[in-house]
Image (cartoon, rainbow, N blue to C red):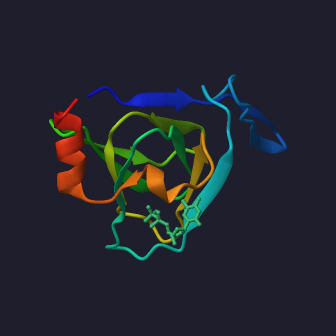
Amino acid sequence: MDINIIDLTVHGDSSGKLVAIEEFKDVPFDVKRVYYIYDTESGVIRGKHAHKKLKQVLLCVHGKCTIRLDNGEERKEIQLDDPKRGIMIEGMIWREMLDFSNDAVLVVLASEPYDESDYIRDYDTFLTSIRGK
Ligand code: TYD
């Protein structure tokens, strides 16, 4: 399974650093929603779902966390700890977010508004639906 890394451009000088994200330029979709996750207790595993259609870019803009990706055949983990480096998730991928540092802020850019019907929250249903394809 290839992990799609998004390396963002940093506009940095002596006054600090700035990263800008534009749809279809820095991320390959229309950004319809942005949310962020913070104050996650250590030991907590978030996510535990797949999406039928949604595309997302995940960026840990402060602190660090681990993203576990599972396509039904293979699992990979990637640590996000750099505010200029994100990962893109699209297609049927089971994802879990874990090992959050106390100061972690995970920003998610999403291609669609929130839609509970796009979620698959049961792992066996996820496996059945990818194997049926
Ligand atoms: P949830 O999907 O369980 O978060 P995670 O996958 O990170 O564990 O969402 C937590 C709550 O927030 C749930 O009640 C749904 C709500 N929510 C929204 O209202 N809008 C959103 O865009 C998202 C992602 C979640």
Locate residue 6 relative to residue 8 in the image: left or right. left
Residue 19 x/y as whole percent: 72, 38
Residue shown at 45% from the left, 49% from the top? 118
Q: Quadrant of the C terminus?
A: top left
Residue 99 x/y as whole percent: 35, 63
Q: Nearer the viewer, residue 127 or 14?
A: 127
Q: Quadrant of the N terminus?
A: top left
Residue 15 x/y as whole percent: 84, 44
Residue shown at 69% from the left, 22% from the top? 25
Residue 5 x/y as whole percent: 46, 29
Against 32, residue 62 (above or below) is below
Extreme right residue here? 15
Residue shown at 54% from the left, 40% from the top? 57
Residue shown at 67% from the left, 33% from the top? 30
Which quarter of the figure has residue 89?
top left
Against 24, residue 40 (above or below) is below
Q: Count of labels shown?
A: 0
Q: Nearer the viewer, residue 10 or 31?
A: 31
Which quarter of the figure has residue 45?
bottom left
